[in-house]
Image (cartoon, rainbow, N blue to C red):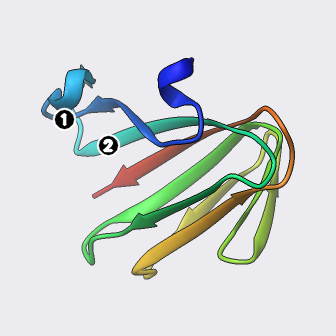
Amino acid sequence: MAQKQGQLRLVASGDGRNDSIKIHQDVDLYAAVLKEGDRLNYAVNSNRSLWLQVARGSVTINGKTVNSGDGIAITQEPKIALIATSNDTEILLFDLA
């Protein structure tokens, strides 16, 4: 878990880079554990979409609140700004074709 603390860590990808699990899909799956006030920024390629799943805690993403158990699709955004609004927040970020 320490490798996911306060940062996005690539855990699965189509090519297995950066010690991630190789899967046969055009997706990059990131995980992070955040404390309240932690901020993450992520640039989105123009031909990609994102899905953010909040496993625990809550975040704001581009000004929208997302709570534990909720997910949000992000399309046609060049970047996202995510702020953890509770301690021990855990997220999964899917970067999809």
Left or right? Give the position of 54 relative to 9. Answer: right
**The quarter of the displayed image where residue 57 is located:** top right
Q: Say which of 95 and 83 sits in front.
A: 83
Residue 95 in percent (x, y) is at 37, 53
Which residue is labeled 1 in the image?
14
Left or right? Give the position of 85 relative to 34. Answer: right
Rounded to the nearest angstrom, the CA distance separating label 1 from label 2 is 7 Å
Quarter of the rendering occupied by the N terminus:
top right
Location of residue 39 with respect to 9 vertically, above or below = below
**Marks 1 and 2 close (CB-CB < 8 Å):** yes
Q: Amino acid at mark 2?
A: Asp
Left or right? Give the position of 46 relative to 16. Answer: right
Q: Say which of 55 and 39 sits in front.
A: 39
Question: Which residue appears at 31% of the width and 66% of the height?
Answer: 48
**The quarter of the displayed image where residue 46 is located:** bottom left
| First reached walking from the N terminus: tag 1 or tag 2 | 1
Label 2 SS: strand
Q: Which mark is residue 28?
A: 2
Question: Which residue appears at 27% of the width and 71% of the height?
Answer: 45
How crowded pointer 1 is (Cα within 10 Å; few <14, some 14-19, many 20+) is rated as some
Q: Which mark is residue 36?
A: none
Residue 67 in percent (x, y) is at 84, 50
Q: Amino acid at mark 1?
A: Gly
Location of residue 5 with respect to 34 vertically, above or below = above
Question: Which residue appears at 77% of the width and 55% of the height?
Answer: 37
Label 1 SS: loop
Quarter of the rendering occupied by the C terminus:
bottom left
